[in-house]
Amino acid sequence: MRCTPVQTDVPARLDRLPWSRFHRLVVVALGITWILDGLEVTLAGSVAAALQTSPRLQLTAEQIGLTGSAYLAGAVLGALFFGHLTDRLGRKRLFNVTLGVYLVATAATAFSWDFASFMLFRFLTGAGIGGEYAAINSAIQELIPARLRGRIDLAINGSFWVGAAMGALLSVWLLDPEVLSPDMGWRVAFGSGAVLGLVILYLRRFLPESPRWLMLHGRPREAEKVIEEIEARIVADGKVVLEPVKATLLLGETHKTTMLSVARTLLRAYPGRTTLGIVLMAAQAFVYNAIFFTYALILSRFYGVPADKVGLYILPFAVGNFLGPLLLGPLFDSWGRRQMIVTTYALSGILLGLTGWMFHAGHLDATTQTAMWSVVFFFASAAASSAYLTVGECFPLEMRALTIALFYAFGTLIGGVGGPWLFGVLIEGGSSGEILWGYLLGAALMIAAALVTLKLGVAAERKPLEEIAPPLSSR
């Protein structure tokens, strides 16, 4: 616990670092969370039809929607629980714990014997992934230089779709009845996530604790040691000379984060940013979770796509989603956060409404439906990634992980948990007109989020985290 004021230059030293092998390690070892989530969500969607015909499970469309909601509910609770621990105990400790929870739960999913067990294991898998969100996003934003934070954060969040592509390809092979039996293919698919997680657990051994977290928790000497080690690695790898920094931060007594202090900060100090964060997270959560968790059902129910071929249609959809944040990300640093968030949310909402109308009017087949979705989510993926960027960088560091968890939880509860269930019910009804109303609701939410950003957006591009939102313990 720090009692006397401390002058620190840790933030400035982190932000002036050149891009290096160390930063690439951060991206790979921590950004893998989104790949794992993409793998999980895609597998759940791709094997939906197989779960309906599985001799042991025989799930209905509504039950598949419920398991999607269970995964999201677990992610919400996991984010809140582990988010609090991440701010209290540190980034490094928790991003290993949360990955371990995911590994055990996704492996257990492969051994599900009925609907109840399958839903329970999906809930626990979601809890591990939700906890990862809080620990990982806070660590990444604290370690990446300010001038690159937008594009790197969007690219990492967009890597969800690398996992989605992997899941799509994997499902095509594993769900082929000539390769594995119908009841075995989906089990091996879920177990594959645990194998990838083990590799990442090893890589994370080489990452340090966030110097910013150490700095704010009364451990300035440890923070200094970590930043010196990072600088030494970068100098040795790149043969560069690091310029001295002048900017410093004066820290007073260590702030003890409580739910009361978090609520006071969100509602009194930053009410506009709080509103913005909830709106952005809720809109993207509804659109993504409602549509993607039930995409396989649309393909099989309305276009007659066989269960073992669904992954082929999800693959181009995933490519479009990955390219959006990757190609548009640099504009969030150069043109600006507010401008790009408004643009991507508005365009994705308009295109989503148009695609829903074309679906209802019968102008699409499986191929053109996939092409339209790929265009819609090229923009929607960048929009969704910018929501996580916004809630991560716009609030004080002492409560960063818990804040990310709270916004993820509120946004997902408002817009995500009910979405897969709602669309499952609409698809079960068999009417394209009913499904159209669901798509129009998602479009309206995205456009509304764009309008809110126009009013409340924050110009956080290229600014240090401590300038966007001063630490609660700063003087």
Image (cartoon, rainbow, N blue to C red):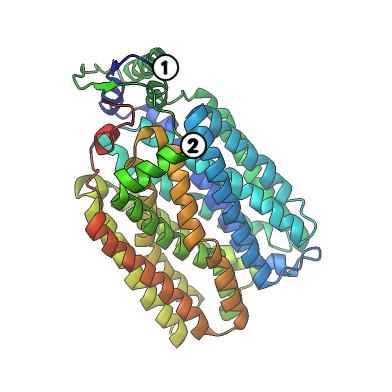
Looking at the rendered structure, the kind of residue marked 1 is: Arg
How crowded pointer 1 is (Cα within 10 Å; few <14, some 14-19, many 20+) is rated as some
Identify the residue under disc 1. Answer: 219
In what quadrant of the picture does the C terminus appear?
top left
Residue at x 43%, y 60% (from the top left corner): 282
Q: CA distance from mark 2 to mark 1?
A: 19 Å
Task: Residue 257: give x, y in percent of width and height.
Answer: 44, 33
Residue 244 spot, x, y in % from top left: 21, 16
Q: Is residue 68 left or right of residue 435?
A: right
Q: Quadrant of the N terminus?
A: top left
Q: Secondary structure at mark 2?
A: helix
2 vs 1, front mark: 1
What residue is disc 2 on? 135
Q: Name which residue type carries label 2.
A: Ala
User: Which residue is found at the position 41% from the left and 65% from the top?
Assistant: 374
Q: Which one is earlier in the sequence, the residue at label 2 or at label 1?
A: 2
Residue at 30% over, 67% down: 347
Residue 144 versus residue 275 in the image, above or below = above
